[in-house]
Image (tube, rainbow, N blue to C red):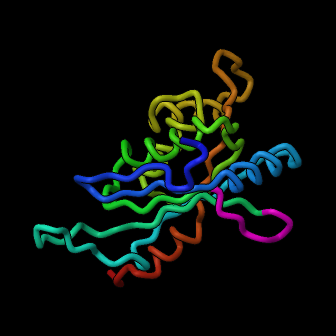
Amino acid sequence: MPNDPLNCSGIVHNFVHFWSNLQLQIYKECYSRVKIPTMLFDATGGCCKKIKRSNGDQSRHLFLYEGVMEIEGKTFTALSMISEQHDILSIYSWLDRWLRCGIKPPKMIVCDQSLALMSAIVQSFTQYKSLQAYLVLCYKLIFNPNDRTFSVLTCYIRNDVSHFIYLITKWTLL
């Protein structure tokens, strides 16, 4: 499947995972040149229209998910997904299929506070099977820095505060 630029599509719930061999090659080259390979993940529902199914029903909201890197001051899209499923399993499947193309996971991720996205990223790129387990380790690292009874993180996840600040600006005054 790595030779196919359209990597997966669904019938029941619409989704498409897509990246090309060139994108994989660029990612691998960039990964080997930087000290801390970093990716940014985000999703938007503002650029895809709902699809009318053959039976006349409309799809749910379609979201475009992107995994990008910065290369020499420019943004490079390494992988994408359009999906009407917005859950951990759907996002995890997308990331897992990408990793199965023989690439190394990034060492740092930046994303918003989407629980589904953060949970799927933890399961895909770290040694932890849940966001809760990852957060417990982060707590231990901060409050017990000399305790060496736990594993060092294989991937560090940062939250993009601009999303959080935007949410605060939408609050109504109390």
Q: In this view, does 57 lie to the left or right of 5?
A: left
Q: Nearer the viewer, residue 174 or 80?
A: 80
- Looking at the image, residue 141 sits to the left or right of residue 83; the answer is right
Asked if the magenta segment contains residue 39, the reply would be no
Image vertical order of residue 159 relative to residue 94, above or below: below
Asked whether, in this view, residue 3 is left or right of residue 55, the answer is right
Residue found at x 58% / y 27%: 127
The residue lying furthest to the top in this view is 149
Above/below status of 83 relative to 34 = below
State left or right for residue 74 relative to residue 93: right
The part of the image, by quadrant, that contains residue 152 is top right
User: Residue 122 at x, y = what percent?
Assistant: 53, 39
Q: Nearer the viewer, residue 134 or 60?
A: 60
Quadrant, the C terminus: bottom left
Which quarter of the picture shows residue 60?
bottom left
Residue at 50%, 55% (x, y): give it. 6
Q: How many discs appear?
A: 0
* Along the line of sight, the residue nearer the viewer: 124 or 170: 124
Question: Magenta stretch: residue 72 in it?
Answer: yes
Which residue extends farthest bottom? 173
Where residue 96 appears, as percent x and y from the top left, is 51, 39
Give the magenta-colored segment's residue range: 71-78
- Whole-percent x, y for residue 155 in the image: 66, 38
- Magenta part, dominant SS: strand
Residue appearing at x 81%, y 51% in the figure: 30
Residue 111 visible within the image: no
Residue in the picture at 55% in, 50% down: 4
Report x, y in % for residue 32.
Answer: 85, 43
Q: Kindly tell me whether residue 116 is visible in this rendering.
A: yes
